[in-house]
Image (cartoon, rainbow, N blue to C red):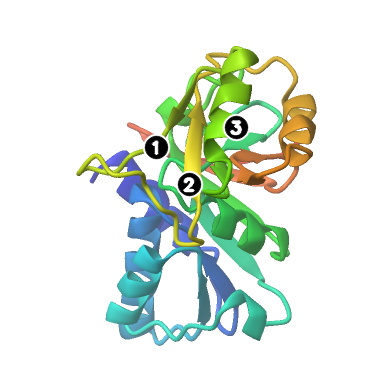
Amino acid sequence: MNLKEMVGIEAAKFVTDGMIVGLGTGSTAYYMVEEIGRRMKEEGLKITGVTTSKATEKQALGLGIPLKSIDEVTHVDLTIDGADEVDPDFSGIKGGGAALLFEKVVATYSRQNIWIVDESKIVAKLGKFPLPVEVVPYGHQQLVTLFDQKGYEPKLRKNETGQVLVTDGGHYIIDLHLQQINDVPALAQELDTTVGVVEHGLFIGLTGKVIVGYPEGPKTLEKR
C-alpha cells in the first residue's frame, strides 16, 4: 500500500454516521473518497458529501455517495483534503490540483479540517512548492507582470495540451516560484488585497490535524 493510500484510509476512520463531509481533491484525497465509498457499501455508513471539484464529484457519484453543494448545507462537520506543503504552524500550500478556491470555501465552512499528506509534504518553511494564485482571466497578464516585478517568478499554468488551464470556477492560475516564504500571513494579506486575485493557495489557521504517511505507518499530528 502506498503512503497516500495509507493516510486516505486512516483519515476515513474519522468519518461517522450522519456527518456532512467535505471531500477534498487530488491524488491523496482520492483514496479517502474511495474508502468512504467502501465503508458505505460494506459497513452501512451514511453520510452526505460536499465536493471541492468536478473531479471529486464524478468520483463520489460513481461510488454512490449522496452529494449536496456547499450552498445546500448549513455547515460541514469534517473536511478531509490533501496539501502540497505543511509547515510546523499547520499553515499550508494547496492548489496543486487547481481546486484551491472551492477547497478553501469548503474548508472555511467546516467545523473540522484534516489534511492528509505523505512525509515529503512536511516542511520547515513553505514556498518550495509553487504557490498557486487563482485570478480572473481579465487582466491576468497585468498580474503576471506585477508578480514578475516583485521577483515572484510567476508562471501561468497550462494544461497537458499547452492551453491555459481553466479552473472549475472559470479562472486562471498563476504559480509563484518563491522557493521560501518568510512571512506567510503578510504574503496572504498582500495577495488578498491584490485586484484580480480571486484566491490563493496559502491556507492559514484552518486545520488542527494532519495525518502523515510514513513507511512504518500513518502518524496523526495535532496542533499544539
Q: Residue at x 58, y 54 (%)?
A: 101
Q: In which quarter of the image is residue 70?
A: bottom right
Q: Answer with left or right where residue 120 lies relative to residue 78.
A: left
**Residue 146: where, in percent of width, then height?**
63, 24
Observer able to see residue 126: no
Q: Quadrant of residue 111?
A: bottom right
User: Sequence-wise, which precedes: disc 1 or disc 2?
Assistant: 1
Type of amino acid under label 3: Leu
Q: Residue at x 72, y 41 (%)?
A: 195
Disc 3, SS:
helix
Q: Which mark is residue 143?
A: 3
Q: Which residue is drawn at 41% across and 53% down?
A: 166
Disc 1, SS:
loop
Q: Residue 172 carries which label?
A: 2
Type of amino acid under label 2: Tyr
User: Sequence-wise, which precedes: disc 2 or disc 3?
Assistant: 3
* Cα separation between marks 1 and 3: 13 Å
**Residue 8: where, in percent of width, then height?**
40, 54
Specify the quadrant that holds the C terminus: top right
Q: Is residue 64 above or below residue 25?
A: below
Q: Which residue is drawn at 39% across and 60% down?
A: 32
Q: Residues within 10 Å of mark 3 (few under 14, many from 20)?
A: some
| Disc 1 to disc 2: CB gap under 8 Å | yes
Give 149 or 109, whichever is nearer the viewer.
149
Label 1 sits on residue: 157
Disc 2, SS:
strand
